[in-house]
Image: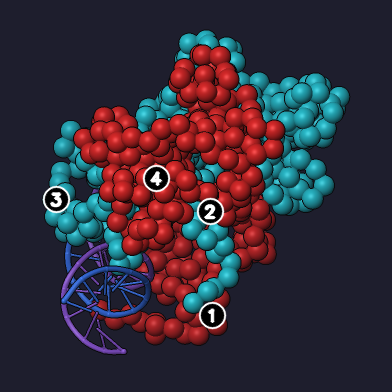
Chain colours: A red, B cyan, C purple, D blue
Amino acid sequence: MDNRTPPNSLDERPRYMQIQAVLEERITAGAYPVGTLIPTEIELTQEFVASRSTIREALRHLSNRGLVDRKQGIGTRVISSGAGSRYQQAFTSLEELFQVSSETYFAVLSAEVISLDPDLALQVDGSSGGQEWIVVSGVRWTKEGGRPICYVQSYIPKRFWPQIAEIKEYQGPFFAFLEQHSRTPIEEVVQEIRAVPMPPDFARHLGLRPGSWSLQLLRRYITSKEVLITSFNWHPSSEMAYVMKIDRTGRSDRDAP
Amino acid sequence: MDNRTPPNSLDERPRYMQIQAVLEERITAGAYPVGTLIPTEIELTQEFVASRSTIREALRHLSNRGLVDRKQGIGTRVISSGAGSRYQQAFTSLEELFQVSSETYFAVLSAEVISLDPDLALQVDGSSGGQEWIVVSGVRWTKEGGRPICYVQSYIPKRFWPQIAEIKEYQGPFFAFLEQHSRTPIEEVVQEIRAVPMPPDFARHLGLRPGSWSLQLLRRYITSKEVLITSFNWHPSSEMAYVMKIDRTGRSDRDAP
DNA sequence: AGGAATTTGTCCGTATGTATA
DNA sequence: TTATACATACGGACAAATTCC
């Protein structure tokens, strides 16, 4: 069919984003005050000469950002002026992970090849198990003072076994080493944080009583092809808080150079 | 046109939710391992005999929950199996905080003014204690199924006491309400994640045995002048994993060709 | 380097269901 | 009960990003 608007009318962004921006501006400017209903989807299709799908896509984003609340049979209500909704995650980058490894020291306790049982496989790469992986275990220490920080287990694909001696000596995070020796770059890191009991054996290495709990950080470093490394860190619950800051950022839209 | 599937084939839920549930189960069961691509939208339309829009709606929800990552030209990649936890929070911005509050509801148990002891004051606003704050306690529930998600305590400056009735009725996160009724916008949010014992009284409200542990999320919403609200969420350790994506570069501000 | 194939993104139009007033 | 407004669902077309040859 025909896309009645030329691909770009001086604005490169998708149609729904443009509409979203206009609506958002009306909300922040007070044209659509907090607490009121904005025009219906049908009315907006008429104003912007767009299909209902496109309008809904714009409204969906406004809803996700917390500016409006949509209810069947009622309409779309403004619930926030927008001042508080433009936040983005800040300071959670790989650089931050490098930082940690420069002020600490990792002592390898063991490195061996194991076959993943189903439960573990689900955590390591989400598979149903059976494959063999290298597991490197150790304790991370502070350089200053020499106190234990956390117990670490890293799961690495078995094909890196020839480099295992090199890995154990490597200063810096394992993922950096593996990325260098792999064809494909890490595209994404996913972190999962849980409260789990500290395994008794790990507790011993950290100088803790058995039966204590831990804050467990699981990080999965993923290339476009596979999980390159999955790392578990068990931190003593009494000494670890994971702190993150979410800063306000002015702009989330892209510009046209 | 014809809606080839009868409105309900023993399952009242919308089609896209059923499909989402099936895909989610395959992910958690390991049929679609982490790091791999799931079938394309087209293939899924064939398997489920649904339109591409319906498939996309299902995938959209999986993406919002942080289980998959979708990329143009690539496909849909599993990035987290979500194993072992019913409730997850993928929290890349405040948007998703709103998302949570739209799929759940908050039942207020009490609201009272208390004087902060030094330890608590340190957590609430970093002061040494003595000031009076309002503390609103309650439980967050799933709309679907009606199961308890977490116990919540929110600390609010005492001067908002006149609005407390309004706050208790407010749909949506408290910080949005407070920001509206305050002169100054929220400038940053600090979040702290800890593993702490679940207080016995809270455990009772969540249907847990005393002595269990929790993943505690503390969020402090800060304006240029003060801490506007500090909120503690205690999640059952067995059902909560905090999932987050970490950017490769950490900077999405600037364009680098 | 360049072009084809693949996959998700965007957009159109229509029809029907469901919650609310 | 009726009207309204959003929710769900269908199907088709082209755009844009990526990969592969």
Residue A112: mark: none
Mark 2: give few (<14), some (14-19) or many (20+) Cα within 10 Å.
some
Q: Residues at badges 3 and 1 in contact (C-beta under 8 Å)? A: no
Q: Which mark is first along the chain, 4 or 2?
A: 2
Q: Is residue A217 left or right of residue A146?
A: left
Q: Position of residue A224 (x, y in %)?
A: 33, 58
Q: Chain of mark 3?
A: B
Towards the viewer: A81 or B257: B257
Q: Which residue is mark 1?
A: A256
Q: Position of residue B249 (x, y in %)?
A: 52, 61
Q: Residues at badges 2 and 4 in contact (C-beta under 8 Å)? A: no
**Count of all numbered marks drawn on residues in the image:** 4
Q: Chain of mark 2?
A: A
Mark 4: give few (<14), some (14-19) or many (20+) Cα within 10 Å.
few
Q: Position of residue A243 (x, y in %)?
A: 63, 40
Label 3 amino acid?
Glu
SS of the residue at dot 3?
helix
Q: Which mark is first along the chain, 4 or 1?
A: 4
Does mark 3 fall on the same chain as mark 4?
Answer: no
Label 1 amino acid?
Ala
Front disc: 1 or 4: 4
Front disc: 4 or 3: 4
Front disc: 1 or 2: 2
Towards the viewer: A173 or B218: A173
- A173 lies above or below A126: below
What's the distance in space between the residues labelled 2 and 4, CA to CA? 24 Å
What's the distance in space between the residues labelled 3 and 2, CA to CA? 39 Å
Residue A94: mark: 2
Q: Is residue B232 visible?
A: no
Q: Chain of mark 1?
A: A
Q: Which residue is mark 4?
A: A165
